[in-house]
Amino acid sequence: MASRYRRVRARALKAMFKAHAEIYERSGGRIGAWLGLPTLLLSVTGRKSGKTYRTPLVYFEESDSYVVVGSDGAAKRDPQWWKNLQVDPNCEVRVGRKKLAAKASLASGPNRERLWEIGKTVNPMWSKYQTRTDRELPVVVLTPRDG
């Protein structure tokens, strides 16, 4: 029964995120905040399918870049968007009405720790998620590309 609940919950969440991404994109970025948190729309290329996938993510700004965390609600595995970026780090980011090409990189070492501390103040749920999974949540920096 528990595994059936997880499957139904996962499908419902997937549908909800897909609808959120669609509303964000169709509104030209005018509608998109997630529960009052700063939210961007990340578009990545599927590593197997080659299709474009869009995911709304809570973010914060660092210098000229955007920082997101691969929490996936404390899932045991990294989120698909991060797996896709590991194969092809080129992506597109929509922040409100602004759309830009970006390149993803994994923060590590002292820089990861610094960004993680900032991130926990932006979205306190990330701390809770980290306690619920054995994997280290990836802190991903999305840096705009020139041109």
Image (spheres, grey):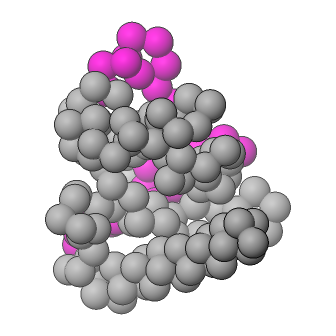
Q: Position of residue 108 (x, y in %)?
A: 49, 19
> Relative to residue 145, is residue 14 drawn left or right?
right
Q: Position of residue 78 (x, y in %)?
A: 64, 45
What is the residue that sits farthest to the top in this orientation? 110
Q: Is residue 51 visible?
A: no
Q: Position of residue 33 (x, y in %)?
A: 24, 69
Q: Is residue 96 visible?
A: yes
Q: In this orientation, which residue lies closer to the viewer: 93 or 79? A: 79
* Residue drawn 48% across the image and 33% down it: 131
* Residue drawn 29% across the image and 36% down it: 119
In the displayed structure, 67 sits above or below 57; it is: above
In the displayed structure, 84 sits above or below 103; it is: below
> Relative to residue 40, is residue 85 drawn left or right?
right
Q: Within the magenta stretch, is there residue 105? A: yes
* Residue drawn 33% across the image and 61% down it: 40
Q: In this orientation, which residue lies closer to the viewer: 24 or 50? A: 24
Magenta range: 86-115
> Relative to residue 121, is residue 135 drawn left or right?
right
